[in-house]
Amino acid sequence: NAGVMQNPRHLVRRRGQEARLRCSPMKGHSHVYWYRQLPEEGLKFMVYLQKENIIDESGMPKERFSAEFPKEGPSILRIQQVVRGDSAAYFCASSASPQVSGNTIYFGEGSWLTVV
Amino acid sequence: DAKTTQPPSMDCAEGRAANLPCNHSTISGNEYVYWYRQIHSQGPQYIIHGLKNNETNEMASLIITEDRKSSTLILPHATLRDTAVYYCIVRVAGGQGAQKLVFGQGTRLTINP
């Protein structure tokens, strides 16, 4: 888990508000992944990004969810008009370029979203 | 969908070796076997990975069968802090086609005093 920084660690939002979760990858990593874990369930892939590009968003809900990884700054997972079902732990992970041998994916400690 | 099969739960006595099995009968030649664990309310922690040969690091050993259809993660001297859900994942690592990790249900390992 060393190095992948997520904030906030805990976030409470009222229904209808927006939630923004930030992820700074490990130093030297240019690939970011977002996962969601609902209470008492497993980790589900959401989106895979490279700097300024979305590589795979096959796990992203079609509405209200978006992600970006700008050239400068952290990756952002944005949830608009949150509903109670969005309450979950959101984990960010990062890796080096696939061209780098090894290419292990490392996870952050997660952001816990509670919608009230 | 996850390409691995693991027992849902296991118990092990503190100080003994914990051996966690994983079946991956459809693994491809360029897919690695990765192991992660998730301690309650924490992010997944990388443990070890391998392709064909057995691997060992400071955390664990990974034994991969010759036909690569199954593997075993070994925690040589389990402690109470090793209680966690352990995930076995197959994944292309490196080069074109490197993929995200797909998590299954994992094995809930409980270390008993």
Image (cartoon, coloured by chain):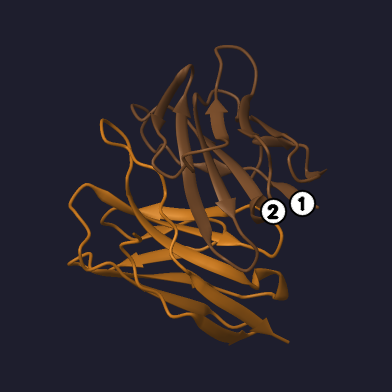
Mark 1–mark 2 distance (CA, rounded to whole Å): 5 Å
Seen at 56% across and 76% down, the residue is B108
- Count of numbered tags: 2
Q: Are marks 1 and 2 in contact (CB under 8 Å)?
A: yes
**Residue B46 relative to residue A73: left or right:** left
Determine whether B39 is above or below A74 in the image: below
Marked residue chain, label 1: A
Q: Residue B94's quadrant in the figure?
A: top left
Q: Position of residue B106 (x, y in %)?
A: 48, 69
Q: Nearer the viewer, residue A60 or A45?
A: A60
Q: Nearer the viewer, residue A4 or A60?
A: A60
Give neighbour class at mark 2: few <14, some 14-19, many 20+ (Cα, 10 Å). many
Q: Position of residue B95 (x, y in %)?
A: 28, 31
Which chain does orange denote in the image? B
What residue is pinned by disc 1?
A114
Seen at 22% across and 64% down, the residue is B68
What residue is pinned by disc 2?
A87
Question: Is residue B14 visible from the viewing direction of this image?
Answer: no
**Residue B51 relative to residue A61: left or right:** left
Q: Residue B66's quadrant in the figure?
A: bottom left
Query: Dot 1 lies on which element?
Result: strand
**Residue B90 relative to residue A94: left or right:** left
Give neighbour class at mark 1: few <14, some 14-19, many 20+ (Cα, 10 Å). many
Quadrant into which the N terminus of chain A falls: top right
1 or 2: tag closer to the N-terminus = 2
**Three-letter amino acid code at the position of disc 1:** Thr
Query: Dot 2 lies on which element?
Result: loop
Which chain does brown denote in the image? A
